[in-house]
């Protein structure tokens, strides 16, 4: 019972997970906040870039588009992925990460600083919020995503740190 739920949850959120993971590979050079400050701190910091945001959304949408082609081979109870849903999930993930960075700067956490749960759930919350009008999910899928996302996120970040793609392992 648990394994099918986890598989269905991963299937649904894959575009958002992909979008959230890709910006670190993009190595962007143009900060979204263009160096601007607010309340004495950078709006977002150098870690949120135009290149990372655009490629993250594109990569997540591509992952979802590939899912569309794989759907005929998936169980009938899986969420029906569309390219539109993949884009919304990807955009939501990037937007949520940007909102999380903005919050972290307001409370004085520097770029690379840890904010437990905010770091792991900001992108998920926005992806779920924006995708809700397109795809209703069972409450158990939401619960599974909230539980498993911090684990997946921390594991992926540790791998990124080990591969020297990220400066910090969180």
Image (spheres, grey):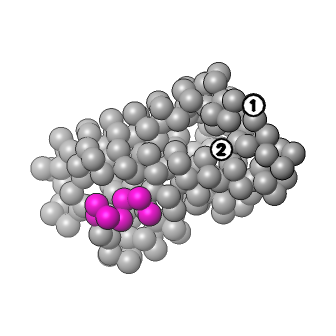
CB atoms at circles 2 and 1 under 8 Å apart?
Answer: no
Q: 15 or 48, which is in the foreground? A: 48
Please tell me in which quadrant of the rendered image residue 37 appears.
Answer: top right
Residue at 66 percent of width and 60 percent of height: 118
Q: 80 or 110, which is in the foreground? A: 110
How far apart marks 2 and 1 lie (CA) works out to: 28 Å
Residue identified by numbered label 2: 158
Q: Nearer the viewer, mark 2 or mark 1?
A: 1
| Residue 35, numbered label | 1
Q: How many marks?
A: 2
* Residue furthest out toward the right: 40
Left or right of 161? Residue 97 is left
Residue at 26 percent of width and 40 percent of height: 65
Which residues fall within the magenta stretch?
Answer: 129-135
133 shown above or below 87: below
Q: Secondary structure at mark 1?
A: loop
Please tell me in which quadrant of the rendered image residue 68 appears.
Answer: top left
Residue at 52 percent of width and 40 percent of height: 21
**Residue 144 position in % (x across, y down):** 45, 70
**Residue 13 position in % (x across, y down):** 39, 55
114 shown above or below 117: above
Left or right of 17? Residue 121 is right
Q: 31 or 114, which is in the foreground? A: 31
Residue at 51 percent of width and 62 percent of height: 125
**Residue 15 position in % (x across, y down):** 38, 46
């Amino acid at each position: 019972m648990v394994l099918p739920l986890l598989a269905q949850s991963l299937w649904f959120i894959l575009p958002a997970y992909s979008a959230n993971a890709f910006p670190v590979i993009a190595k962007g050079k143009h900060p979204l906040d263009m160096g601007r400050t607010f309340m004495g701190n950078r709006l977002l910091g150098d870690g949120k870039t135009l290149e990372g945001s655009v490629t993250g959304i594109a990569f997540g949408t591509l992952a979802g588009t590939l899912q569309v082609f794989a759907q005929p081979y998936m169980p009938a109870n899986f969420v029906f992925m569309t390219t539109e849903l993949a884009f919304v999930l990807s955009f939501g993930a990037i937007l949520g990460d940007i909102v999380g960075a903005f919050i972290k700067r307001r409370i004085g956490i520097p770029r690379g600083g840890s904010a437990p749960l905010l770091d792991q759930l900001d992108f998920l919350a926005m992806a779920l919020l924006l995708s809700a009008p397109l795809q209703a999910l069972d409450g158990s899928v939401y619960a599974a995503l909230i539980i498993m996302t911090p684990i997946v996120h921390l594991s992926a970040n540790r791998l990124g740190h080990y591969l020297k793609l990220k400066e910090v392992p969180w």
